[in-house]
Image (cartoon, rainbow, N blue to C red):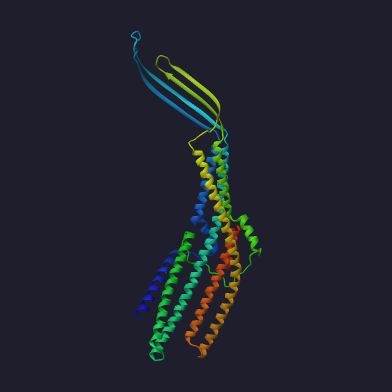
Amino acid sequence: MKKIFFGIITAACIAFSFSVNAEEYNTDERTNFSRALTLALQNDQDLQAAEFAYQGTLATRGISKAALLPQLNLSGFSSSTDRDTVYQNPGFPNTNATVDTTGYSLSLSQTLYNHGIYKRLQQTDMSIAASLAQVEAARQDVVVRLATAYFNVLGAQDNLKFASAEKDSIGKQLEQSKKRFEVGLIAITDVKEAQASYDTSVAQEIDAQNILSAQFEALAVILGVYKTNISAMNEDIPLLIPEPANMLKWTDSAKNNNLALRAAQYEFLAAQKRVDADQSEHLPYLDLKAQRQYNNQQGGTFGSERTDTSLTVQLTVPIYSGGSTSAKHKQSVALKEQARALKEKAKRQAMQQTRDSYLGVTSTIAQVKALKQALLSNQAAHEATQAGFEVGTRTAIDVLTTLRDVFRAERDYARARYNYVINTLSLRQAAGTLTMSDGENIDIFLQ
């Protein structure tokens, strides 16, 4: 009896705690998927990180391009020198003078030809394209991750509903067993077994409540806010076979449009351009240099004022730089091979996700239909048991058992519908055709 009391108190405390948290964070209207998607696109940290990474990569183009533009520098100086002169020839008197010197230097340089700079600029362009693809991939990923978290919450709610119904059913069975034991119809072992089953059901309900709380937390990570009042799924939803109904066409689309693969392809191209740029450091480069220097010296025996202007075309031929050029080339070749491996990995993952999701959609369609029929059968069995109870041919425990079967069937039927939607989104993501409208259209499946 103490175990029962402790289990009930613990479950009540957790339920109360969760209800307080729910009221604290759930003061607004019910949140459907499109509202949740709007919040996720505003607050998801993975997406924001990808967007800031793109902005940073975009800025590198200006850095790379600057090497092709004129470089203008101005420097000025002013100095004062005390000069004491002692002559060894006594015919010349010793002198002491202060020499003040001022001046400036204005220099202009312009790259006329540098193959490496052009390759660096091309490398930057490929990196920018890769970063942009990563942003778009992150936006698609938000939709799929949000759908997974959203329907995990609904699934956890279904599981809690089932756990509570099962606990109630076993509780009624325990009470009936105790009464039958009191009148000598069953042994004490039957009561102990019923008690053990009830204690287990209490623990399972507590676990289901904890899982639901954890799923709300996971959803909040994506949304940036707590939303506990979310729209449930409709009983019946349209089940559409992937169009085209050909897995090869979907994998072909993934090869051409998968954004993670596209980003990896651009990263590989950027790595190739880096190899070219490092190789170019062996090549000559040509610069134009212009300089104007002014020097004004006051004091001493003779003052002077001097202006020099020069224009130079300078050809530089790299001969030896201590081995750094060769080392850079080896490094860039290794990084290119790394990028090649990552590109191949991205391709394989895109193919796997496409095939798995395609099969997932087609199989869950069949599963949803089968589980819907199973639900109807369990409902019919429950109604028949209820009718038998009313005429005295079935017991209350029989009624509760069939009711528990109905709840289990409802849970499994709902989980299959959730998986259908998630697999559909995952298939479009893998094929590179997922849009924000696809996410917003999920609301047609919700109440």
Residue 321 is left or right of residue 7, and the answer is right
Provide residue 340's location: percent of width, then percent of height: 56, 51
Is 133 placed above or below 113 here? below
Q: In this view, does 385 lie above or below 61?
A: below
Callout count: 0
Q: In which quarter of the image is the N terminus?
A: bottom left
**Residue 229: horizontal and vertical position, in percent?**
49, 67
Front-most of residues 443 and 217: 217
Q: Which residue is pictured at 51% across the width and 55% down the height?
A: 47
Pinpoint residue 154: horizontal percent, then vertical percent: 51, 69
Q: Residue at x 55, y 25 (%)?
A: 311
On screen, 59 above or below 44? above
Q: Which residue is drawn at 62% across and 56% down?
A: 255
User: In this rendering, does residue 334 appear at all?
Assistant: yes
Residue 214 in which image quadrant:
bottom left
Is residue 296 shown above or below 348?
Answer: above
Q: Nearer the viewer, residue 22 or 386?
A: 386
From the viewer's perspective, tell me whether residue 390 is left or right of residue 186: right
Q: Where is residue 364 in the image (x, y as percent from the top left)?
A: 58, 69
Outermost residue to the top: 91
**Image quarter (top left, top right, bottom left or bottom right) of the C terminus:** bottom right
**Quarter of the view holding residue 433:** bottom right
Can residue 438 be seen here? no
Residue closest to the eye, 339 or 358: 339
